[in-house]
Each structure stands twice: as structure tokens, then as C-alpha cells.
Image (spheres, grey):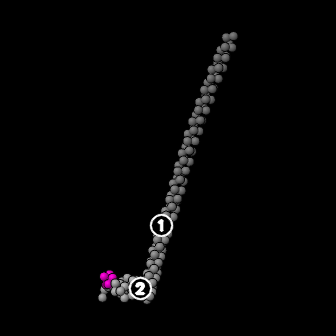
Amino acid sequence: MTITQDNRHDMHSVLIEKLGRESATTLMELLPPVGWADVARRSDVESARLATTQDLLLMTASTSAQFNLVWTEIAAVRSEMSAEFAAMRSEMSTEFAAVRSEMSLGFAEIRVEMYKAFHRNTLMLIGAMTAINAIIVGVAGVLLKTL
């Protein structure tokens, strides 16, 4: 039989007539607000506690396994990145060595061109100075004869 709120109210009214208002209210407060089938026993609470503990243990194991997978993936990514960075460092080292070699060769070519240009200019200056000295000597000789 399901106890309704009307049943509880009728019972409270009868108890007030038989026991008085204060005793009837006290007795009604001692009764569960629902039927006795809905009241949990200690064994029910213990069973629920054990089930909850088992659920928490399973969840902890599952979460731990998932975290282990995440850490494994992070380690794999870290390893892959290390390998990529090592390859990039090697490639950059090779490329910089090639650039240094090209620059060294280019500077050597510039030095040779500058040496040739300085040598040609020096010879031209020596020739020009020799010609100017010859002109000066010739002019001086002519001047000396005229005096």
C-alpha cells in the first residue's frame, strides 16, 4: 500500500484526538517521510559505499592509464622534435659551411682583382711620373740652353 500525503494527514488528525497535538506531532516526525520500502538500511548504505569505492578504483585506474598514454605521446613528440631539430642543426651547419666557402672564394677573387687593379694603376702612375720627369728635364734643358 502506498502512503499518500492525505493518509498521513488523516493519521495525524486521529493521533491528535487520541494523544494530543504535541505527542501526535512528535510521533509523526519520527516516521519516515516516505514508505518504509524507500528507507535505506545500514547494509544498503554499506553496499552503496563498496560499489562507490569500486567505481572510484576503476575510474582511478582508467584515468591513470589515460595519463600514461598521454605521457607516452608527449615523449614520442619530444623525441620526434629532438630528431627534427638535430636534422635542422645539421642542415644549417652544412649550409653555413657552404656559404662560408662561397664567401671565402668570392673574397679571394675580389682580392685578386684588386691586386691586379692596384698593380696596373701603380704601373700607370710610374709611367706617368716618368713621362712628367722627362718633360721637366727636357724643359729644364731647353731653359738652360736659352740662358
Residue located at (59% from left, 39% from top)? 115
Q: Which residue is mark 2?
A: 23
Q: Tell me the crowding category of disc 1: few under 14, some 14 to 19, or many 20 or more residues within 10 angstroms, Cα based.
A: few
Write down the quadrant of residue 2 in the picture: bottom left
Q: Is residue 69 left or right of residue 15?
A: right
Range of magenta residues: 5-10
Residue 144 at least partly seen: yes
The CA distance from mark 1 to mark 2 is 74 Å
Q: Which residue is mark 1?
A: 77
Q: Secondary structure at mark 2?
A: helix
Residue located at (61% from left, 32% from top)? 122
Relative height, residue 44 to residue 141 (above, below) = below
Nearest to the observer: residue 108 or residue 56: 56
Q: Position of residue 72 (x, y in %)?
A: 48, 72
Q: Tell me the crowding category of disc 2: few under 14, some 14 to 19, or many 20 or more residues within 10 angstroms, Cα based.
A: few
Predominant secondary structure in magenta? helix
Relative height, residue 117 to residue 140 (above, below) = below
Write down the quadrant of residue 144 in the picture: top right
Q: Position of residue 14 (x, y in %)?
A: 34, 86
> In the rendered structure, does residue 121 fall within the stretch colored magenta?
no
Q: What's the residue type where badge 1 is placed?
A: Val
